[in-house]
Image (cartoon, rainbow, N blue to C red):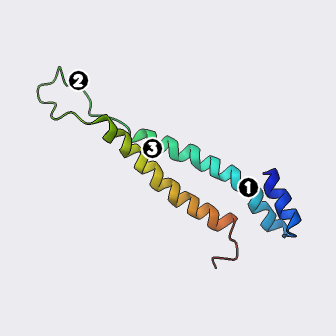
Amino acid sequence: MILGGYLGEAGGLSFEEKSGYILFPFLVHTLDLFVSTIGIFFVKTKPGLPSLKPDYGVLEDPLDILKRGYYVSLMLAFVGLFFICKTFLFLEAFP
C-alpha cells in the first residue's frame, strides 16, 4: 500500500490511478481469503467408513482429493486476479 502510493506520487499519476495502486494489495489478499475458503469446501471424501460399509466402493487417493481443491482455487484465483488487475492497474490498457 505504501509502495503503491509512493510510486503513484513519484510517477505523477492522477488520484484515481494512485488509488488503484494503493487498493490493489488489499484486494489481492481479500481474493486469497475467499478463494481459499471456497477451495476448502471441495476437499472432502465420500461419507462413511470403508471398513464398516461393504458397498463403499473404491478408496479415493488422498492426493486426488487435495488436487481437486487446489484446481478449483487456482481457477478462481486466475479469474479473480485478472479482473482485479484489469480494474485497478491497467485502467487505460483495456478499454
Kindly report the distance in space between the C-alpha atoms of the residues bearing marks 1 and 3. Answer: 24 Å
Label 3 packing within 10 angstroms: few (<14), some (14-19), many (20+): many
**SS class, disc 1:** helix
Q: Is residue 63 above or below residue 49?
A: below
Label 1 packing within 10 angstroms: few (<14), some (14-19), many (20+): some
Residue 4, located in which quarter of the rendered image? bottom right
Q: How many marks?
A: 3
What amino acid is found at the position of numbered circle 1 in the picture? Answer: Leu
Q: Residue furthest bottom?
A: 95
Q: Quadrant of the C terminus?
A: bottom right
Kindly report the distance in space between the C-alpha atoms of the residues bearing marks 1 and 2. Answer: 47 Å
Q: Position of residue 54 (x, y in %)?
A: 11, 25
**Which one is earlier in the sequence, the residue at label 1 or at label 2?**
1
Identify residue for label 1.
23
Residue 69 horizontal side relative to residue 29, left or right: left
Residue found at x 48% / y 54%: 76
Q: Residue furthest left?
A: 54
What amino acid is found at the position of numbered circle 3 in the picture? Answer: Gly
Identify residue for label 2.
49
**Which one is earlier in the sequence, the residue at label 3 or at label 2?**
3
